[in-house]
Amino acid sequence: MTSRRTARLATILGASTAALLLALTGCAGGAASDDSTRIVLGADDGNEAHWTVLKQKLADEGIELEVRTINDGVQLNQGVQDGELDVNLFQHLIYLSQFNVENNGTLVPVGATAVYPLALYSEQYTDVKDLPEGATVAIPNNPTNLARGLLNLQTAGLLTLKDGGTALSTPADIETTKIKLLQVDTNQTVTALKDGSAQAAIVNNTQAQKGGLGDELIIFKEDLDNPQLAPYINAFVTRDDKKDDPRWAKLVAAYHSPEVEAAVTELNQGNLQFKTEWTGAQLQDELTSLEDALKAQNG
């Protein structure tokens, strides 16, 4: 998931191709191309300030960047798959792997951007150790953030998962727990916290900001250097047959310029960690591993 809106996009992967193509036709402004002086990029937040900065950085390199806003993750991926978009930026690797497996996609990551936190918040307690036995903890119910939330709670010492858990873990993998889980829609995690349904909640960065949850309410936060968070690295994504296009190196370099990173950092109130050390090949290896695990899980 590349901006603070990423997590809310880990959603429906079973929609019909016909419906997706119809919706995409209404959003797109014509097909993308292999023009080396132009990039058509899909995003869910195309009006944010950092895109303006990125456009200027690429213009200095002789590349015109067009950013199209599409508020649906499946459509954003289908647009790249069908050639309406050259590349997109909105998702992390586990979401991409789910799309490819469920839709026979051939999309690949070509440049890492950042990892965004999924923290545990509470308005009643100031430390995770203070949560009483049997406390109710709200957790997003979409598969991607559900698994990540479970890993988060395990690291916090609130539960244990079978074999240490993975990016595909479910509540069925819980072996021991000190808490009760309340699975809710991602958009309802803050509500569950504020209306007393839960004493603590796993909340993504976007919802925390929308709900007015400041960092002072975080009682447990992930270590964004943890290798276990590799599936949650956000990336620029294109089609496999275009992965060696030289435009992507310029795009990634411009994104990680001080000016663009500063704008992205401001947007996310500093709650992120850029991942400049990951190469396209490393990202693609991680994606393949995730896809293989999903296929094995699905039988």
Image (cartoon, helix red, strand yellow):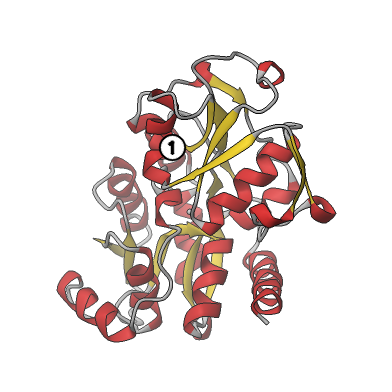
Q: Is residue 260 above or below residue 158?
A: below
The quadrant in which residue 32 appears is bottom left
Task: Give the percent coordinates (x, y) of residue 102.
Answer: 51, 79
**Number of dots carrying numbers:** 1
From the image, tell me which residue sits under label 1: 189
- Asked whether, in this view, residue 64 is left or right of residue 138, the answer is left
Q: Alpha-carbon neighbours of circle 1 within 10 Å: few (<14), some, or many (≥20)? A: many
Q: Nearer the viewer, residue 143 or 223?
A: 143
Pick whichever, 32 or 35, lies toward us: 32
Q: Identify the residue at the far front of this view.
A: 134
Work out whether residue 63 can be spotted. Answer: no
Going by the numbered disc 1, the residue's amino acid type is Thr
Point 42% across, 59% down: residue: 89
**Residue situated in front as seen by the camera: 91 or 36:** 91
Q: Residue shown at 38%/59% (left/top)? A: 61
Depicted 235 relative to depicted 98: above or below: above
Tell me the quarter of the picture where residue 156 sits.
Answer: top right
Residue at the image position 38 percent from the left and 25 percent from the top: 195
Give percent across and percent down for residue 216: 51, 16
| Res. 191 visible in picture | yes
Q: Quadrant of the C terminus?
A: bottom right
Residue 297: give x, y in percent of width and height: 69, 74
For residue 262, above or below residue 286? above
Above or below, 105 against 135 in this view is below
**Left or right, 297 with reference to 104:** right
Could you tell me which residue is drawn at 57 percent across and 31 percent down?
A: 136
Q: Image check: 250 left or right of 179?
A: left
Residue 272 in the image: x percent, y percent? Answer: 53, 37
Horizontally, residue 244 falls left or right of residue 77, namely right
Q: Helix, strand or loop at disc 1?
A: helix
